[in-house]
Image: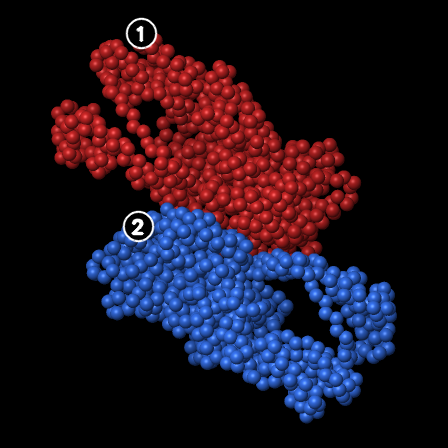
Chain colours: A blue, B red
Amino acid sequence: MFADVVLGIEGRQFEEHLDSYKEAHHKTLDTDMDADDWKALVDIYKDLVNFPQDPAVQLRQAIEAVFLSWNTPRAIVYREMHNIPETIGTAVCVQAMVFGNFGDDSGSGVAFTRNPSTGENHFFGEFLVNAAGEDVVSGVRTPRPISEMEEKMPLMYKQLFETQQRLEQHYRDMQDLEFTIQEGKFYMLQTRSGKRTGRASVKIAVEMVAEGLIDEKEALLRVSPEHVEAFLHPMIDPDARRDIVASGLPASPGGATGQVVFSANEAVKVAADGTPVILVRRETTPEDIHGMKVAQGILTELGGMTSHAAVVARGMGVCAITGCGSLTIDYEKGTVNTADGISFKRADIITLDGSTGDVMLGDIPKTEASSSDDFQTLLSWADKYRRLKVRANAETREDAIKARELGAEGIGLCRTEHMFFAADRIDSMRGMILAESKEERQTYLDKLFHFQKADMKDLFEVMHDLPVTIRLLDPPLHEFLPQSEEDIQALAASIDKSADSIREMTRNLHEVNPMLGFRGCRLSVVHPEITEMQVEAIISAAIEATEEGFNPHPEIMIPLVVNVREIRFITEIIERGIRKAMAEKQISIPYKIGTMMETPRACLGASRLAPAVEFMSFGTNDLTQMTYGFSRDDVGKFIPDYLDRKLVEYDPFITLDQRAVGRLMKIAIAESKDRKKGIKYGICGEHGGDPVSIQFCHEIGLDYVSCSPYRVPVARIAAAQANVSGDVPD
Amino acid sequence: MFADVVLGIEGRQFEEHLDSYKEAHHKTLDTDMDADDWKALVDIYKDLVNFPQDPAVQLRQAIEAVFLSWNTPRAIVYREMHNIPETIGTAVCVQAMVFGNFGDDSGSGVAFTRNPSTGENHFFGEFLVNAAGEDVVSGVRTPRPISEMEEKMPLMYKQLFETQQRLEQHYRDMQDLEFTIQEGKFYMLQTRSGKRTGRASVKIAVEMVAEGLIDEKEALLRVSPEHVEAFLHPMIDPDARRDIVASGLPASPGGATGQVVFSANEAVKVAADGTPVILVRRETTPEDIHGMKVAQGILTELGGMTSHAAVVARGMGVCAITGCGSLTIDYEKGTVNTADGISFKRADIITLDGSTGDVMLGDIPKTEASSSDDFQTLLSWADKYRRLKVRANAETREDAIKARELGAEGIGLCRTEHMFFAADRIDSMRGMILAESKEERQTYLDKLFHFQKADMKDLFEVMHDLPVTIRLLDPPLHEFLPQSEEDIQALAASIDKSADSIREMTRNLHEVNPMLGFRGCRLSVVHPEITEMQVEAIISAAIEATEEGFNPHPEIMIPLVVNVREIRFITEIIERGIRKAMAEKQISIPYKIGTMMETPRACLGASRLAPAVEFMSFGTNDLTQMTYGFSRDDVGKFIPDYLDRKLVEYDPFITLDQRAVGRLMKIAIAESKDRKKGIKYGICGEHGGDPVSIQFCHEIGLDYVSCSPYRVPVARIAAAQANVSGDVPD
């Protein structure tokens, strides 16, 4: 800092001279340098810097250097990023030097007041006699367990032990300490809250409440929501050596090891006997679902944090890395090359760390996922203190059961199209799209009706007494059509159409920018019969569930609206469908109709939308795409450069951008809440599972967040933290 | 109205009974029905309606019916669309009936106080003796010129003539009159401002100023900006019979007739001997430019009002119809089928009306495009009274000359990429994109530098003393790469690459949603060397132009920004390029750096962008795409349904959406204008040439609009109207 600022010399110039000195004198390590070497080097340094010889001047200049560092460009950018005011300034702490290497009555050590790996309440640390702190942590000498200090230096140990107890009591948190003993005198150098693993974090927080050190609210704030991952997914052992061969986006947390496979079919075949597999693809599509289901982990070259692979993997709780752009995948040869010239091939074993985005060769040790009593206790406190409800995004009975088990209070997003991609349904969907007459289309709609109804009934049963928000068909129709010649031929045979007519329709439906194209409620406007089928299926399922003693709460959600006229138009279709479904039975099903808020225009026109809906659910994936003009499927081409150059602080698909996307949400809420009594607000984008975003959702007054089932516990804790953070002293 | 509202019977039920009566009694026309037929029909009607027999009751109910019509659903929607307050209410006008068919001393007629086709100040009309008004206009009898009335009914004519003079004086506008004479007594039935052609409109307005009837400001308000088209483009004769075979979007105004061709190369070949051609394509791409240049008109199946075909055609002043979705084009067979089963083929003659979107077979008569003294007078008044500056979007010397001739006060948008699509440049561009080393890339950048510099110098010369706003490279790089196998092979040979490597790069650059992808300033971030080349070319050109006595004002514009960090990062690159270009010479060129405002995030963060820029230019094409989530290339699939069902009132790519897009603009201006002294605001989307949008741009305080050269006169008049509309009494 001193050299950096006061003298305008960059630190690395010193490093460079050290390196060239070592090279010239055949020294490998710094410790190979003797006193004369250092003296010679210091002479070189003195030529670089007019170094003051008066210690008082040195001290004053050093202090000034720290104060001046407040205005380095890097510090300014950092403050700007984190909204730190210019005016608060920095402090300088001046300490006298003490020496642990003055003989056998001296020493140094580091310690934790509790075990940072397991959380056990047991004093834990390492020390060395006649050594400086640097010797303990650098690995040059092997430090001894702190228990030996009790034998070798009982008096010093007693002081240390009492001090650590006092510090933990004072700070009411597990402490990471550094100490030095100089000629029989004990000095504390530093204390700070200690880093800990996820499991340790939860154990320490819960036990400290039992010990009366902190209260439940503070315990909640002590656990980072990411710490919760350790209870839900196997995690790469933090102490394991990792030889990283490539890095991508940490799309779905946890660690996974398996054999490399390159297609969904291959995944199914290899995994049939229980062999763990890692599915490696350029990108995934709905046609890959069966392979993703059996894979331990998923690795893609393309796609961002909200790409298909990322969203599906998170939904399944499967580890995934996406947007790993440094990979070149050759499906035909069955090889993968990294940018660094390393390659691996089909059937090789690789390990993914979905929490960091690291790809490694071989099998890396992992910790097991399992719940614990402490964890359940913490979650019960979270539920006690949070205001935000937590729902899950789910489409299948399996996911819904998992979601409810993990504490979801309903389904906040059921993407009905997911139900149509399954092998037994896709041809009916395709037949419907390719139908040339109203009658033909109706035949396929009737088939889809039965699938949809059965699926919805499953969800209503699992979510008995809880709301289920069902989004009407959303993706562009061409996403359902087959791409490969083989699939086109198969479809042609199955639905009795010519391959030519399938290709023609695919061409007609092709879009330049499907994200901004013929999808969402635009499908309902042009093809009301699809919406009618969906609504009848939903309500018929709800009626049957009711007859069987369940208590369904369907909430029908209209996607991608830009104005209230769309909502009015589609509400008429929905209510027609509902009347038709209810006509036969004498049961009245409670239902709600609402809208997704995912275009900037919907947010800016919320005051006009409000009277026509009962809820608004922010679809912040699309809202982010449109607000930034970032396609989540394509940002991989420039977001890494943006992050490198600090042109964005974070990927806005991971953490909600409060400045613009969040502002649109705030405008929408402020301008609609008084226009409709009892209107509910939710979020169902991927941000619904991100702790920082959840804090924001709490602050702007949403009623619920909805996220992948495996994020539900994370969201419960984040929601509680958002609500209690004001109550706990800093 | 009566039946509609009071009795709840829809008008079409009467029509249906009339039709079935005629069919049953073998009557073709209404006039085939005799008195007994009508009596019989009226009896049927009476069964439908309990018709009051007391005339006073009839009158009262009729009056009530009109008042009640204020609250029909259609009226409510209409008011909502046009922001008409609920409270103003409607009026009812009650007139006694007079009869022109009571004998030879009776008659009826219609007249205009001036000629509505030419604008000549000459009383103009038609009449019939012993006839009702309906007879004059229905075409059942052939009416006589009004001049004959002077001979046949001199007294009546005198009254009519004096009345029309008085009415025109009173209303200070050309009047469209209806009159009836009953047994020698003259009655005026109605007077209103008369519809007129574009040329008539201008002539009347200018002459009325000379006559002292109106002042210059009012004259400006009398001309619809669309009327100006008639002076700039050949127009389809409004009286010509049109057999419309298909309708698309009116993408570029004017009328055109020519032989059907299906490719740019074919267009060039056929047009070589002066044969007029109409280029018919599914869509156009930059590779079609040479064919578009020689075509009289352009017709595309796909694409909206801001598609490539539309934008380029407007820029060239060539008639175009886009998004004509009812056409099925078969390039191989050289045929076009319409939805109605009509077809035409290669070399057939068709006519396009680019002002209405109508496609017709054969050659339809057109009026010539030519300026007039009146028109120039009107434009000079427009310039006198407007506050908004008008610039043009232009890239070539030719377009810039045209723009300046039509009154442009600078270039508001020079899309630099247009310069790279020309045949002699595209391979250098492609070579640059495909380069595998920095050195290789630099070789191509050096070539592009010379092209860019020469092009820019042309613009600076033509725009001497005026600003030229140059947008940095904007489109995704894959747009420059060849698509067809033939072009790939040709490129491979030309730049010494393998076809495989070209295909590989095309695959790598492929994007799911290019509109939201790797383009705009994102290119500058990842490839700063391209920006550096562009800036050096711009500034070197400005230096040379200055040395040759011109006075260039380059304004460098950064596209697609989402935050200020991008602007800072790219401004550094720009200023490095400028320093490099200026280093050799001792000339200081004035320049500005600004940003396009085309993402919602840029608008919502304008307060942060402002300190880093000197101007902001709203790119409302992209801003509309992102605010609505509408891809301008894909809206053709649903916008027709939306317009039909009144789910949108107008295509937001034609007329700026004030509610959301306009609100983002207002937010941007309000939050940035005090953050930067002298900051200028402009608009360079296609809305810059739309009169309603120009009015809005004036109101929110923009400094200039920029539009296609041929829209400049329209914009000048619209800008003047916006500024004077408050000064003239309604």
Which amino acid type corresponds to the residue marked 2 in the rendered image? Glu
* Along the viewing direction, whichever of B50 and A419 lies nearer the viewer: B50
Which amino acid type corresponds to the residue marked 1 in the rendered image? Leu
Quarter assignment of residue B538: top right
Tell me the subunit letter for badge 1: B
Quarter assignment of residue A62: bottom right
User: Could you tell me residue B147's position as x and y percent?
Assistant: 35, 11
Q: Is residue A184 above or below residue A379?
A: below
Is residue A392 visible to the viewer in this orientation of the structure? yes
Residue B240's label in the rendered image is none
**Residue at 64% of width from left, 84% of height from top?**
A162
Q: Is residue A234 left or right of residue B678?
A: left
Is residue A691 visible to the viewer in this orientation of the structure? no
**Residue at 62% of width from left, 84% of height from top?**
A124
**Residue at 63% of width from left, 38% of height from top?**
B468
Residue A572's label in the rendered image is 2
User: Could you tell me residue A633's position as x and y percent?
Assistant: 51, 58
Q: Is residue B104 above or below residue B78?
A: above
User: Could you tell me residue A9's position as x and y percent?
Assistant: 79, 62
The residue where tag 1 is placed is B155
Secondary structure beneath dot 1 equals helix
* Quadrant containing the C terminus of chain B in the rendered view: top left
**Alpha carbons under labels 2 and 1: distance apart:** 62 Å
Near mark 1 (Cα within 10 A), the count class, few <14, some 14-19 or many ≥20, is some
**Residue at 75% of width from left, 43% of height from top?**
B582
